[in-house]
Image: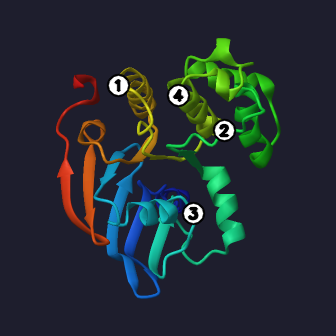
């Protein structure tokens, strides 16, 4: 009987990957975020939209453990990270968050393979075979030895995605991932994100594009640092 009770009281794994509880961010007299409350479930795909100056970048920096809020709590996979030092946040980010940027941020003198391996260096041990597998996953195995200038914009973005995935992050955070791409490459990147979501990845995308937001299960719209609208996308990802 005692053994049954112990089994029943085992701590459960949190169903939410992220919770923002009354989060605010103030820079001097500017209220960049005001009392934000948000929950993201594990395996969910969320889009964040809003005009310039609405607080999207500030929210992304807080979610991505690149900054701390002025007040409120940030719960990442059951752990309150809002009061952690910047050094501790760097460790959390490296171990649990895959970042995809609009500007790619690839090192110009390193090959695609080496750019992916850089992320391994900061996290654990370098493993060339594992990095090659990550490139193969995004369809770039045959471009592994190419420098960034030898790759198209779409290929560079896929290297960024491979780099973001190499350490098996709990959360993929993408900032305007198709902003610098033409229509054909935008579709390639969105199809790749859709596949990752189908495999169980949690994805948060910051975007200006309603077409990109349609791929998400839920969209929130920011204005003046507040969430003014939340919409559920009833389409299945395969309907796109």
Please state if 64 lies on the left or on the right of 220 as rendered: right
CA gap, disc 3 and disc 2: 20 Å
State yes or no: discs 1 and 3 in contact (Cβ < 8 Å).
no
Name the residue: 36% across, 45% down: 44
Would you identify the image quadrant in which residue 145 lies?
top right
**Is 195 located above or below residue 222 in the figure?**
above
Query: How far apart are labels 4 and 2 at the CA level?
Result: 11 Å
Q: Are marks 3 and 2 in contact (CB under 8 Å)?
A: no
Q: Is residue 66 above or below residue 46?
A: below
Who comes first in sequence, dot 1 or dot 2?
2
* Closer-to-camera residue (195/205): 205
Query: Which residue was labeled with disc 4?
Result: 153
Q: Examine the rendering and report whether any part of residue 150 can be seen.
A: yes
Q: Residue furthest bottom?
A: 29
Instruction: Residue under label 1, please give it.
Output: 183
Give the CA separation, mark 1 to mark 2: 22 Å
Residue 65's disc is 3
């Amino acid at each position: 009987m005692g053994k049954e009770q112990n089994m029943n009281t085992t701590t459960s794994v949190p169903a939410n990957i992220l919770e923002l509880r009354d989060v605010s961010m103030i820079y001097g007299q500017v209220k960049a975020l005001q009392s934000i409350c948000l929950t993201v479930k594990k395996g969910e795909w969320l889009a964040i939209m809003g005009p310039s100056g609405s607080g999207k970048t500030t929210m992304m920096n807080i979610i991505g453990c690149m900054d701390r809020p002025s007040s409120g709590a940030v719960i990442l996979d059951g752990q309150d990270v809002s009061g952690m030092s910047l050094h501790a946040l760097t460790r959390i980010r490296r171990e649990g968050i895959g970042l995809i940027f609009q500007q790619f941020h690839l090192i110009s003198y390193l090959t695609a393979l080496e750019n992916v391996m850089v992320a391994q260096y900061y996290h654990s041990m370098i493993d060339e075979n594992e990095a090659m597998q990550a490139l193969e996953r995004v369809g770039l195995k045959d471009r592994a030895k190419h420098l960034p200038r030898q790759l198209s914009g779409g290929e560079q973005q896929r290297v960024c995605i491979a780099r973001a995935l190499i350490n098996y992050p709990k959360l993929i955070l993408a900032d305007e991932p198709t902003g610098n791409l033409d229509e054909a490459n935008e579709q390639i990147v969105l199809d790749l994100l859709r596949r990752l979501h189908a495999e169980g990845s949690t994805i948060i995308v910051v975007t200006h594009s309603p077409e990109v937001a349609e791929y998400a299960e839920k969209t929130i719209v920011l204005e003046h640092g507040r969430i003014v609208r939340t919409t559920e996308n009833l389409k299945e990802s395969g309907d796109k």
